[in-house]
Image (spheres, helix red, strand yellow):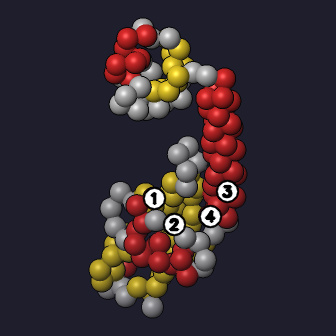
Amino acid sequence: MRVILSQDNKELGKKGQAVEVSEGYARNYLLPRGLAVIATEGATKALAQEKQAQDRKKARELTEAQKLAARLEATELRITARVGDGGRLFGSVTSADIAACLAARGIAIDKRRIELKEPIKVMGRYSIEVKVYQEISARLTLDVVTE
């Protein structure tokens, strides 16, 4: 019997995949638990439409992420901080501070997407990587200057 999986199944395959299983397995296990539906012509068409919708959504998200990455590449941030001897800061500049500075410019980025190995504690110019999307990242320039 041919069925379309409604959920990922370790033995059979991924969600949305059409697989051939025994009739007893389908009728007694997969169908009653909602793990699969019978692969009728209507179900196959619905699956194809859902896949196309997901592909369009992913393409739209990808183009938006590329635009955001280009905007971030062109962005140069300046954060002022109190500085002590030797250019060391009182406190530090963290990814939350950078996210707040970006938000003030109208760019909404989650602080967890800003890649800082450790907080910035010395005055200077830094190149910071921001993960925009799964495979897209951008580098922005950050100047930490004295008040």
Q: Which residue is mark 3?
A: 64
Q: Which residue is mark 1?
A: 113
Secondary-structure class at tag 3: helix
On the question of residue 144 being in view, the answer is no
Q: For this rendering, which residue is in front, 112 or 81?
A: 112
Quadrant of the image containing the C terminus: bottom left
Spot occupied by residue 76 in the image (x, y as percentages of width and height): 61, 72
Q: Are marks 2 and 3 in contact (CB under 8 Å)?
A: no
Q: Are marks 2 and 4 in contact (CB under 8 Å)?
A: yes
Q: Are marks 2 and 1 in contact (CB under 8 Å)?
A: yes
Q: Spatial distance from mark 3 to mark 1, Cα to Cα?
A: 16 Å
Is residue 76 shown above or below 41? below
Q: Which residue is mark 4?
A: 72
Q: Spatial distance from mark 2 to mark 4, Cα to Cα?
A: 10 Å
Q: Residues within 10 Å of mark 1 (few under 14, many from 20)?
A: some
Observer-side mark, 1 or 4, equals: 1
- Which mark sits nearer the N-terminus, 2 or 4? 4
Res. 109 mark: 2
Q: Residues within 10 Å of mark 2 (few under 14, many from 20)?
A: some
Spot occupied by residue 32 in the image (x, y as percentages of width and height): 37, 28
Spot occupied by residue 122 in the image (x, y as percentages of width and height): 37, 73
Q: Spatial distance from mark 1 to mark 4, Cα to Cα?
A: 13 Å
Q: For this rendering, which residue is in front, 23 or 104?
A: 23
Is residue 85 shown above or below 118? below
Q: Amino acid at mark 3?
A: Glu
